[in-house]
Amino acid sequence: MTKFSDLNLNPKVLKAVDEAGYETPTPIQAGAIPSALEGKDVLGIAQTGTGKTASFTLPMITLLARGRARARMPRSLVLCPTRELAAQVAENFDTYTKHLKLTKALLIGGVSFKEQEALIDRGVDVLIATPGRLLDHFERGKLLLTGVQIMVVDEADRMLDMGFIPDIERIFSLTPFTRQTLFFSATMAPEIERITNTFLSAPARVEIARQATTSENIEQFAVMFKASRRDREGSEKRKVLRALLDQEGDGCTNAIVFCNRKTDVDIVAKSLKKYGYDAAPIHGDLDQSQRMKTLEGFREGSLRILVASDVAARGLDVPSVSHVFNYDVPGHPEDYVHRIGRTGRAGRKGKAFTICSPKDEKALDAVENLVKRQIARHENPVKPAPKTTKAKTKPETEEKPLRESKPRVSSKSSETSKPRESNKPRESSKSSKRSSGRRDDRNVVGMGDHLPSFIALSFAERRAG
């Protein structure tokens, strides 16, 4: 069995790895690290939770151990799709560089430009950034990428989903052609493959698992749910979620609940807190300091349930997450892989539940086609009410005949059925004169003095004429 000591890493890096409690590299680490240390481009394809971050951080630190960075010219660059993932990568560098004098800077949104510029001005060995904030600094003239020796693109497929591919291509063009590129992704979409063919030179391809597979350590279930009424779908769906949490009981030590929309993240988190669950939301519209505080609480265990949008699907590394709940079936099947990949990490067991309404069945089929397996159906823990809806609608059906039998309605029907002569007692004197055949010489109101003669004729006279 391969050990970290067999991978020709810097002794100080090995010491930090040992102190972190790691002894045996994962398959992706064992496959990617030797090629990266040889200076080759690497294309790593592996499911989430397999240790891809250490696959590039460890060889990068070893290669950068010698040398010194110049002001505004970082020696290496790591691109991440989300702030949370970038912060996670920065934490990994802190862990593995504790015995080396390497500097780093984290460029993400929600943080002051001046603080980041001060770090860049001093010179950094490792620059970790999201594409947007990196280009902001470049366009301000505060950053040069001509000194980049090693460039890493992490979670490339997520970059594609978030529309960062044009930015990635531009950043590639700003770096030297002689750079070493390490490219990691969980799936290989055609657009991702095009970029690797364009910007990677004879890469060592390290593919550990079949594309878009899920970990065997995760038990997966789909809960089929149908609302009693359309306007009650949200409240009844949240009731199903609470029932699942209660059903898992103490086995659910902590959990992440994923929603497709940011508004639902807030609603679900607020609902869980209302019913006494320890929950908090996290999504892209929240302030960065609040997001980091929430994540830190979840990592430390002071927060039990994290309600998240997909912004956290790839940027959260908590090895001991016991459960993942998909409040919504993800619109992109690949997101399902990354969502449930938050549990069952580092050899642990995990459970993933997906609540599926009738309108989501096609999306669930797409997920099953992607992961090449049928997700087990789990019984809905919320039993339908014992026909209470029929009892409520019964009085409404009984009221309808009563409305139809009102005197006003019946008088109308009787009027239409009776001959016109029966209504004569209620007619005005003018209409009675006309019906008897006599002319009415009085002026008609509204017609002026020029009343046409045919109007004054009786009905019988008109027919005779």
Image (tube, rainbow, N blue to C red):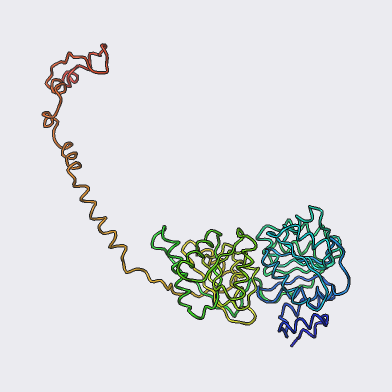
Give 400 or 78, whichever is nearer the viewer: 78
Tell me if 459 is positioned left or right of 9 in this view: left
- Residue at x-position 79% and y-position 63%: 119
**Residue 5 percent across, percent down from the top left:** 79, 85
Name the quarter where the C terminus is drawn.
top left
Q: Quadrant of residue 446?
A: top left
Give 68 or 346, whichever is nearer the viewer: 68
**Residue 43 percent across, percent down from the top left:** 76, 70
Q: Quadrant of residue 260?
A: bottom right
Is 23 rendered above or below residue 32?
below
Q: Quadrant of residue 253?
A: bottom right
> Please, which residue is most extreme toward the bottom here?
1
Tell me if 368 is positioned left or right of 77 in this view: left
- Residue at x-position 51% and y-position 71%: 278
**Residue 384 percent across, percent down from the top left:** 37, 69
| Circle count | 0
Give 446 or 330, whichever is nearer the viewer: 446
- Residue at x-position 64% and y-position 66%: 292
